[in-house]
Image (cartoon, grey):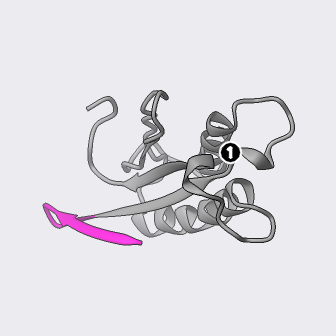
Amino acid sequence: MIVHTTAARPIFIFDYLCNPDVFDDGDDPQLQCVDDLLDTLMTSGSTDDGKLYIKNDCDGLPVYGYRWMDADQAKATECLKQAKDVIKDTCYHRKGARVSNSATCQMRFELSPFQPGV
């Protein structure tokens, strides 16, 4: 995990490798990774305050922006930790070994104050 601070508000950046080989449902594996994470985050929110945005850095895919639905940053951070487990289970080989770079898609998830689409 890399932690940056801007305007006294921490930005947590998590990078994961998405392995297309673990998907057998015919869906785009990179988009499925994003969908799985969004599903996890959206079911954990409760209010309209706070700012959690997710950016997908995969080449050729759009940037996703999603406003965190909980004003409690500690709770948002905990949700990101839980989401990390989801991503690791979904996007890594079940054996836990990373696949080669040519078969992976790097994804970044940020807890930060930036605006979607910026």
Q: Judge the density around disc 1: few (<14), some (14-19), many (≥20) Cα neighbours within 10 Å.
A: some
User: For the view shown, which residue lies furthest in the left direction?
Assistant: 7
Image coordinates for residue 87, horizontal then vertical, percent? 65, 57
Judge by depth and name the residue closer to the eye, 3 or 43: 3
Decide if residue 26 is on the left or right side of residue 89: right
Q: Residue at x 46, y 47 (%)?
A: 68
In this rendering, is residue 116 above or below 72?
Answer: above
Which residue, given by chain and number where applicable, does mark 1 sit on? 36
- The quadrant holding residue 28 is top right
Q: Is residue 64 above or below residue 55?
A: above
Say which quadrant the C terminus sits in: top left
| Residue in the picture at 26% in, 44% down | 114
- Count of numbered badges drawn on the protein: 1
The image shows residue 9, relative to residue 66, as above or below, that is: below
Q: Position of residue 45 (x, y in %)?
A: 56, 50
Q: Is mark 1 on a helix, strand or loop?
A: helix
Q: Quarter-wise, where is residue 55 in the image?
A: top left
Examine the residues drawn in magenta and state their main secondary structure: strand
Q: Is residue 56 magenta?
A: no
Q: Does the magenta stretch include residue 9?
A: yes
Left or right, 8 with reference to 86: left
Which residue is rendered at x = 65% and y = 44% of the image? 33
- Nearer to the camera, 53 or 25: 25
* Residue range highlighted in magenta: 1-10
| Residue 78 image position (x, y, % from top left) | 54, 69
Identity of the residue drawn at 43% across and 42% down? 57
Question: Where is the N terminus found, in terms of image quarters?
Answer: bottom left
Residue type of the residue flagged with mark 1: Asp
Residue 50 x %, y %:
38, 50
